[in-house]
């Protein structure tokens, strides 16, 4: 009886396997892209630092299942959480917390264990308005 040898297959990836890998990597990359600030100016960098700071507080609220309290100082222009603080892009001239006008030297707002926050809107010097989106828990420049 004659033994016919089977065709040797290379141990490399097929074209289809390569395409599948590229699609998966591409989906991951495009999911990550909106969260990266690759070419920001100075104010955008400060805003990115503020958003990173708020995101850490949000993660702590979700992980520990406890409400986190953040404080915005209007006169000095900073955001404080516990002992840590980060500078805002400018001095706060006015604002709203959950649609109520703010007055005084500062205000506390909350990030809840469910991952959302109070709605905060700040008007900074120079007419820049920052709005804290309660669902994404990010400050957006309006």
Image: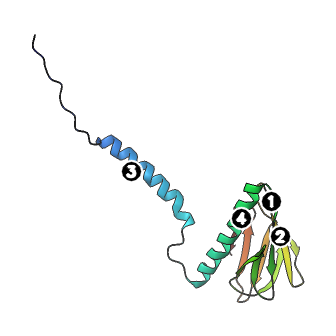
Mark 2 vs 4, N-terminal side:
2
Distance in Å between CA atoms under marks 2 and 4: 12 Å
Distance in Å between CA atoms under marks 4 and 1: 10 Å
**Residue receiving disc 4:** 137
Residue 104 visible, this angle:
yes
**Residue at horizontal 58%, vertical 84%?**
42
Residue 45 position, x and y percent, is 59, 79
Name the disc covering residue 88, or none.
none
> Splitting the image into 4 quarters, where does residue 58 fall?
bottom right
Distance in Å between CA atoms under marks 2 and 1: 10 Å
Mark 1 vs 3, N-terminal side:
3
Name the disc covering residue 112, or none.
1
**Residue at horizontal 81%, vertical 84%?**
74
Tag 2–tag 1 contact (CB < 8 Å): no
Distance in Å between CA atoms under marks 3 and 4: 32 Å
User: 78 or 121: nearer the eye?
Assistant: 78
> Splitting the image into 4 quarters, where does residue 101 fall?
bottom right
**Residue at horizontal 39%, vertical 47%?**
21
Name the disc covering residue 22, or none.
3
Mark 2 vs 3, N-terminal side:
3
> Splitting the image into 4 quarters, where does residue 119 fall?
bottom right
The quadrant of the image that shows the C terminus is bottom right
**Residue at horizontal 70%, vertical 60%?**
59
Distance in Å between CA atoms under marks 2 and 3: 43 Å
Nearer mark to the viewer, of 1 and 3: 1
Distance in Å between CA atoms under marks 1 and 3: 38 Å
Name the disc covering residue 109, or none.
2
Tag 2–tag 3 contact (CB < 8 Å): no
The quadrant of the image that shows the N terminus is top left
Q: Residues within 10 Å of mark 4 (few under 14, many from 20)?
A: many
């Amino acid at each position: 009886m004659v033994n016919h040898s089977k065709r040797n297959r290379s141990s490399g990836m097929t074209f289809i396997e390569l395409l599948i890998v590229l699609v998966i990597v591409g989906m991951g990359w495009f999911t990550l892209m909106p969260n990266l600030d690759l070419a920001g100016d100075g104010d955008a960098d400060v805003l990115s630092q503020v958003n990173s700071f708020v995101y850490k507080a949000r993660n702590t609220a979700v992980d520990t299942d406890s409400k986190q309290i953040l404080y915005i100082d209007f006169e000095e222009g900073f955001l404080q959480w516990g002992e840590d603080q980060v500078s805002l892009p400018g001095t706060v001239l006015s604002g709203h917390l959950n649609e109520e006008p703010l007055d005084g030297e500062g205000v506390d707002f909350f990030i809840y264990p469910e991952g959302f926050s109070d709605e905060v809107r700040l008007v900074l010097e120079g007419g820049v308005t920052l709005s804290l989106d309660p669902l994404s828990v990010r400050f957006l420049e309006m």
